[in-house]
Image (cartoon, rainbow, N blue to C red):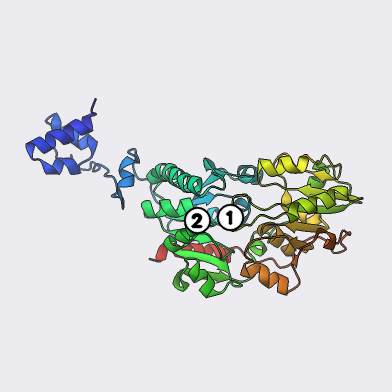
Amino acid sequence: MAGPWLRARDRGRREGDHALRRTSSGEARARLHGQSRRRSPGAQPPRRLRRGPGPLLAYIPCPYKPDRPRTRSRGGDRQLRVWVDCTAAAHPLVLRPIIERLEARGHEVRVTAREYGQTLGVLERLGIPFEAVGRHAGASTARKTGAVASRSLALARWARPQRFDLAIGHGSVDLGVVSVLLRIPSAQMQDYEYAGIQRQLAFRVARRVLAPDAIPVEAMRRAGASEAKLFRFPGLKEDYYLADFEPGERVLDELGIDRSDVLVVLRPAPETSAYHADNPLEERLLDRLANAESVTSVVIPRTEAQAFSARARAAAGVIVPDAAIDAQSLIAFADLVVSAGGTMNREAVALGTPAYTIFSGRMGAVDEHLIAAGRLIPLRDPAELRLAKRKAPPGVRDPRDPDLLVDAILEARNRQ
């Protein structure tokens, strides 16, 4: 049975009253019942739905909510409503200082997260409130595409009535899609220039893209970020979000680690990423670590399959955490880190921990720069791994001010 708005619309068409179709449902019902279209003095006009850029928004309900008053932030600027989207476990870490500084300036921040790996667990550990929306679809391109469409639609329904002024992501494709649909200025961060086609789209629609200055401008342009929207920051992104970091030994006690053992942290490759090739080195490396004496290896898996594979070895010296842990403190106290990804290795570099990469995809400019500087070691044979206690004390080597990134992100609102 058709609702009152549809009946009003049909009646308006029959009567030739085209103006009826442009009014809100409440005004349409008032006219059907013979009430005057005139408003009493001082009455608020009916809220009209904002026109969207495409037909998709016709299916996204937007309940009537009076506009909330806009106050001034502590910096004197208008208070902003900011949306932050986290789609991988590293994103809460990277974006935490940005969220905290935005809130310290008086802005309102809402966070969404995709269920993938330890993303939700890291947010909970950091005490960041969030809305869980969608989950990772696996390695299939077709399923990934369907998941982007499904999650983007769900996020658009959630975000539309909130009238965000700014959206922030770290290569979030879904945030890019929704920012176009809802016309929200967006800023994206990235430190790997060989992103897939979906991330390229996210960079193209963003008004601001932040990347390390180790990545050439031309490489970022090919990735979808024009020079005009590009902000190249010095150092590693890890230098910024670890700037106020102080490692705590509690994680060592929680995992039951013998302080006299050589402590190795191992991070497998993201199985679902298009830019990673199959890497048999991981299995050989884990076999060596499992059989080594006076060595404790902590495997931080990305998926349940990786966790199952590591636990299947049933080696006393191999630990697989059941939940999200303080991985940064673990890395700080580790004697070496071996990772097939990027973030954990760069965290090790930032904290002065010897780092080995077994990345099997196309090496990015940031890692190439670290390898050339001798701060990151490519590992091609498990026998080359030097299992020894480190001598340098833990701590951040080159802390940088996250406010530099916050200022660059806020500039997205003033760009077209």
Residue sitting at the far top: 1
Q: Please give the name of the residue rendered at 79% of the width and 63% of the height, measured from the top-left corner.
A: 354
Q: Which mark is residue 168?
A: 2
As helix, strand or loop, the secondary structure at mark 1 comes to helix
Within-10-Å neighbours for mark 1: few <14, some 14–19, many 20+: many
Q: Residue at x 48, y 47 (%)?
A: 142
The residue that mark 1 highlights is 95
Q: Residue 210 location, x and y as percent? A: 53, 65
Residue 229 placement (x, y as % from top left):
46, 69
Badge 2 marks a residue whose secondary structure is strand
Q: Is residue 191 left or right of residue 178?
A: right
Q: In this view, does 372 lie to the left or right of 203?
A: right
Q: Where is residue 214 in the image (x, y as percent from the top left)?
A: 61, 72
Q: Where is residue 44 in the image (x, y as percent from the top left)?
A: 25, 42
What amino acid type should be assigned to the residue bearing mark 2?
Answer: Ile
Instruction: Tell me where residue 376 sits by quadrant.
Output: bottom right
Do residues under tags 2 and 1 come within 8 Å of each other at their CB atoms? yes
